[in-house]
């Protein structure tokens, strides 16, 4: 199972240039926006959080939607945990779905202040995953699976816990 996970994660590295390009564009926009906000004496946009968030969003969209051909997946699987335990490949997919959303749980509350509670971040992770699954279903670029939503939700929850750990320690050291 580990060989599948490592191989799949390595194959996702070729999507990094899309995220880097998005990060550069967002960085430039933030610099311009902050210059304008400085003139207007308004609070500046936190650049690192915005860059990381939009890099992640672009990479997720490429991985889950744009890298797949239309018609590559059809159908709906509404049975909870139906993909677990079948074989190592399916178990690897479940773990990969968790890993895919750990960054979401970290960068979403970092960038969006209104999502800085566990429940709100979890809700955003759930809704984001649901939208992705619906887009895959409608465009036939993947199978709508409840297991994917649950795994993604778990990943966003784990990511939020990391977020809390990092930022609570950052406040303690200040």
Image (cartoon, rainbow, N blue to C red):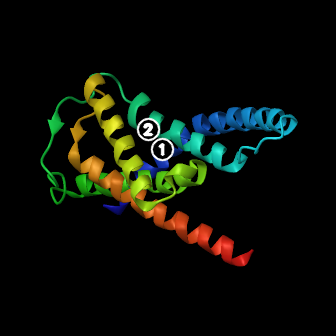
Q: Residue at x 36, y 62 (%)?
A: 2
| Image quarter hosting the N terminus | bottom left
Q: Which mark is residue 12?
A: 1
**43 w.r.t. 136: above or below:** below
Q: Measure the C-alpha gap from mark 2 to mark 1.
A: 7 Å
As helix, strand or loop, the secondary structure at mark 2 comes to helix
Q: Residue at x 71, y 43 (%)?
A: 45
Q: Earlier in the sequence, mark 2 or mark 1?
A: 1
Q: Residue at x 45, y 57 (%)?
A: 102
Q: Is residue 122 left or right of residue 71?
A: right
Q: What is the x, y in percent for residue 114? A: 53, 50
Residue furthest to the bottom: 172
Residue corresponding to mark 2? 63
Q: Which mark is residue 158?
A: none
Residue placed most toward the observer, 153 or 96: 153
Q: What is the x, y in percent for residue 118? A: 43, 61
Residue placed most toward the observer, 112 or 142: 112
Residue placed most toward the observer, 171 or 114: 114
Residue placed most toward the observer, 109 or 88: 109
As helix, strand or loop, the secondary structure at mark 1 comes to helix
Q: Is residue 38 left or right of residue 57?
A: right
Give the tally of numbered discs: 2
Q: What is the x, y in percent for residue 174? A: 75, 74
Q: Are marks 2 and 1 in contact (CB under 8 Å)?
A: yes
Q: Quadrant of residue 18?
A: top right
Q: Is residue 4 visible?
A: no
Q: What is the x, y in percent for residue 124? A: 41, 47
**7 w.r.t. 39: above or below:** below
Q: Is residue 143 left or right of residue 68?
A: left
């Amino acid at each position: 199972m580990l060989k599948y996970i490592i191989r799949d994660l390595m194959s996702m590295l070729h999507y990094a240039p899309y995220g880097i390009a998005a990060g550069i564009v967002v960085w430039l926009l933030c610099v311009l926006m902050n210059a304008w906000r400085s003139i207007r004496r308004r609070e500046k946009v936190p650049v690192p959080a915005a860059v990381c968030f939009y890099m992640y969003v672009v990479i997720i969209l490429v991985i889950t939607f744009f890298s797949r051909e239309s018609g590559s997946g059809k159908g709906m699987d509404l049975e909870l945990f139906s993909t677990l335990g079948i074989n190592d490949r399916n178990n690897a997919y479940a773990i990969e779905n968790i890993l895919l959303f750990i960054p979401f749980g970290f960068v979403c509350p970092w960038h969006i202040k209104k999502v800085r509670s566990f429940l709100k971040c979890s809700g955003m992770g759930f809704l984001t995953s649901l939208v992705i699954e619906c887009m895959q279903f409608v465009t036939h670029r993947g199978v709508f699976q409840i297991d994917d939503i649950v795994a993604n939700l778990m990943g966003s929850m784990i990511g939020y816990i990391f977020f809390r750990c990092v930022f609570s320690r950052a406040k303690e050291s200040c």
